[in-house]
Amino acid sequence: MSALDTRIGKPWKKPPFVQRAWLRWALILGFAAYLVAAYMTIDVNWARVYEGLERGKQFVLAFTSPDFTSRSSDIWEGMIESIIMTVASSVVGIIISIPIALGAARNIAPLPIYLICRAIIAVSRALQEIIVAILLVAIFGFGPLAGFLTLSFATIGFLSKLLAEDIESMDRVQAEAIKASGAKWTQWINYGVQPQVMPRLIGLSIYRVDINFRESAILGLVGAGGIGATLNTAFDRYEYDTAAAILLMIILIVMALEYISGIIRERVQ
Amino acid sequence: MLRLEKLVKTYKTGDQALKAVDLDVPEGQVLALIGPSGAGKSTLIRCINRLVEPTSGNVYLGDVELTGLSSGALRRERRRMGMIFQEYALVERLTVMENVLSGRLGYVGFWRSFLRRFPQSDVDEAFRLLDRVGLAHMADKRADELSGGQRQRVGICRALIQDPALLLVDEPTASLDPKTSRQIMRLICELCKERGLAAIINIHDVALAQMFVQRVIGLRFGAIEFDGLPEGLTPDVLTNIYGEEDWEATIEKVDDDSEAAE
Amino acid sequence: MPVKDLKGQQVWQRRTSRESLGHWVMWLIGVAIFAYCWQQISEATTWFFVWDAPRIANDIWTRATPPRWEYITQLGKPIWDTLNIATLGTFFALILAVPVAFLAARNTTPSKFFIRPIALLIIVSTRSINSLIWALLLIAIIGPGVFAGVIAIAIRSIGFCAKLLYEAIEEIDETQVEAITATGASRWQVMAYGIVPQILPAFAGIAVFRWDINIRESTVLGLVGAGGIGLQLSSSLNVLAWPQVSLILLVILAAVVISEWVSAKVRGAII
């Protein structure tokens, strides 16, 4: 009872998340100092922002009356090009990323191959699409080919990494049972590994198609084909109603893709 | 003290979980609610504090009719009904102390509770309760570090710090081992006696119920099938509630157990 | 039935003939679509440039190496700006994403038929448009600069964070919420005691994860004029100063690697 008696009457405080007091205060003060410093170095031209509010309002209003017609041929061509790039790059990217994923799974591949494949993945993931696109446009010239190559390259990094992780975490016993039946390596992959990772491969592929489409919309900004160029022009000319039309189409297509992918993922699982 | 009148609950699926249940619980009485799974035990308890909205009927707590209350008034009445859950239902990422103090939420304002500035009297009471159940030294541990029995004790503290007149207890021992189950049941019944609380204990284990309570209610298909003293649970009665089975062994074992427990 | 009777012999087949025909047709359609796409791309490509590509790549490589190291002294401010765009953008996005997530989650939304669709619409529309496009738009509205970049990153991140957060909210343990409700707590108290502690780890994880992505994205926002190191990249590209370009690319690469390392460390510490 004595322990309780000493306790009664004393205030109680929640134990702090960071136990060491100096570290806690250092973190809090550091973050506050950073926010102040960041705020000081951003010079916002408030007059310009205020001016812009009117234009912002116009843009929001443009969404209520999007203009699909006056530049319909540009929009149509750009959209088709975006979709074509998406489809082609997804197909090629997925086909290439499967062997790389196999190579990047430590439980399947020997060490040298593993290292090479992991290096490819690392490079592909570290470089952003838009930078790759700039370089490829410089090398291959303007047009959808550069965009197609960019997206294929990005697909490889994304898909191989996630697929390799899935292969590494698969059930060893099932795969070993196939091996024990005297299967060749290719048969082993086909019967022991493939069935286990197939649902995930399909899910990831569809997700990547979705991403590729979204990315294809910006590649046009640097001349790598797709709807981005049309969009950029619309902004440059302050044609908000056309821009709104394009953005609405992008949103609708992305929503449709997400809806379809949800259905497919439910079916394969 | 608590009175249910023609309480009916029909779920959206059309399942009738409660069929016009009438029940009267006098002050300070501890009663056990037994019955097979799906008999409506949980629903009955949850209809009393309206975690589940009853379809029709009345619930009187003292003189207050609960089913018609607005949400603000309902919150005030909920303070008078402490609830103890099957899987403890502690907020796992909060400390033991915060979990106990959360029983006072109905009494303190939002900002006070948000900043963890509870009145000193609440903090003192929390420590007294934790000491009573033997967990005072655990106050600043996180709830997910505790064992099952310890968590249920914290759950009991959370219910009691509300200063309730009635305890609603939903399968308090379902996820505990037999020894801890008995300790928890004993603790609940002792605390009810100390504080003069009424309690409705919804429980699977007939033997355990017989051991501790003063009155047993048998529920079957949402209707009361038996209402009487624990000694009145004959094989015939149990067959009525649960269906055909050899009940002699269960009841005999109960006698042995209760003697061994003394 | 996958077992076929062939001249009195039972032959097992994986699919019935109708099924396998369907499969072949599907594959054929798929290949045809791909062939069409490829043909379209090929038509829009000047193949002369493509055949010339190895020479040009080689040319760019020789011009770009070695990087102009001393240029790094001029990159201090742009790197700082980039960090600010990512961090402040994430910060504002989180502030806005929390209420949107609570309105979008099935178990916390005040109205399933009116408010939830609006919240979901906000999530979908901010998420499906790339931050570069948001930046373009904001530059047209409020003028070029770091501020436009911060807002662009913030808007783009709302949908992403809110989506992950509302999924976390929908996965919480309802009995803990029930227990807090049963004490007579008000709606806000139930939120603070029953729901928030359960989603806090997810929230911290999402914040760091998105910050990492935002560092990547903010390095290129400058390409359209929204401040940060991308501005230097774009001006160097315009004057074909390849040694500067290669240095900037190295800096961006380093930033990406460091931010990924930091986010992995922080997430490890939280979970």
Image (tube, coloured by chain):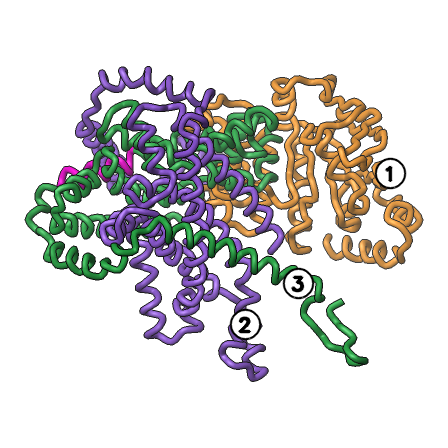
Chain colours: A purple, B orange, C green
Task: Look at 78% across and 29% down and name the residue there.
Answer: B25
Residue projecting furthest to the right:
B236
- In the picture of the structure, the residue carrying the numbered disc 2 is A190
Front tag of 3 and 2: 3
Q: Write down the residue under mark 1.
A: B228
Q: Is residue A134 above or below residue A8?
A: below
Indicate the amino acid at tag 1.
Gly
Residue C78 falls inside the magenta stretch: yes
Position of residue B69 relative to residue A113, above or below, is above
Check disc 1 and report its element: helix, strand or loop: strand
Q: Amino acid at mark 3?
A: Leu
**Chain letter of disc 2 in the image:** A
* Pointer 3 residue: C21
Q: Which residues are magenta?
A: C76-88
Q: What SS does tag 2 mark?
A: helix
Amino acid type, callout 2: Asn
Image quadrant occupied by the N terminus of chain C = bottom right
Q: Do marks 3 and 2 both belong to one polypeptide chain?
A: no
In the picture, the disc for residue C178 is none
At x 32%, y 69%, the residue is A115
The residue nearer to you, when weighing A100 against C254, is A100
Question: Depth-wise, is mark 1 or mark 3 nearer the camera?
Answer: 3
